[in-house]
Image (cartoon, grey):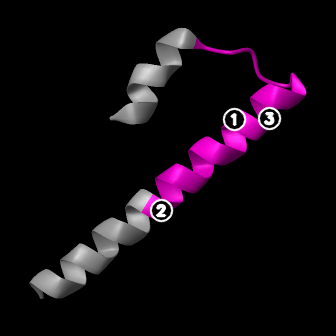
């Protein structure tokens, strides 16, 4: 069971990282303004 939890956690981390990458791409395009305050909530 612990192993399963670890896998789930890794999957969640990957999903979060992917989402951040996608948002960074949008920001690079100029669709999203670079939010400094949002960065802290993102890293949590």
What secondary structure predominates along the stretch shown in magenta? helix
Can you identify the residue that label 3 sits on? 26
Residue range of the region highlighted in magenta in the rendering: 14-35
Tag 3, which secondary structure?
helix
Q: Are marks 1 and 3 in contact (CB under 8 Å)?
A: yes
**Residue 35 in the image: above or below residue 7:** above
Q: Which residue is painted at 32% across and 74% down in the image? A: 8
Residue 31 shown left or right of residue 10 in the figure: right
Left or right of residue 18, residue 40 in this image: left
* Quarter residue 4 falls in: bottom left
Q: What residue would you read off at disc 2?
A: 14
Q: Residues within 10 Å of mark 2 (few under 14, many from 20)?
A: few
Kind of element beneath mark 2: helix
In the image, residue 28 above or below residue 3: above
Badge 1, how many Cα within 10 Å: few under 14, some, many 20+? Answer: some
Q: Position of residue 24 (x, y in %)?
A: 69, 35
Q: Secondary structure at mark 1?
A: helix
- Residue at 68% x, 15% y: name it: 34
Please indicate whether residue 34 sits to the left or right of residue 5 in the image.
right
Is residue 26 found left or right of 39 in the rendered image?
right
- Of label 1 and label 2, which has the lower sequence position? 2
- From mark 1 to mark 3, how far is it between C-alphas? 5 Å
- The C terminus, quarter of image: top left
Quarter occupied by residue 2: bottom left
* Placement of 6 over or under 9, stated as above or below: below
Residue 23, horizontal then vertical, whole percent: 69, 38
Would you say the residues marked 1 and 2 are in contact, meaning their CB atoms lie under 8 Å apart?
no
The residue that appears at 54% across and 11% down in the rendered structure is 36
Residue 24 got which mark?
1
């Amino acid at each position: 069971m612990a192993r399963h939890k670890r896998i789930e956690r890794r999957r969640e981390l990957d999903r979060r990282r992917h989402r951040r990458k996608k948002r960074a791409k949008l920001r690079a395009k100029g669709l999203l303004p670079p939010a400094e305050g949002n960065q802290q909530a993102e890293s949590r």
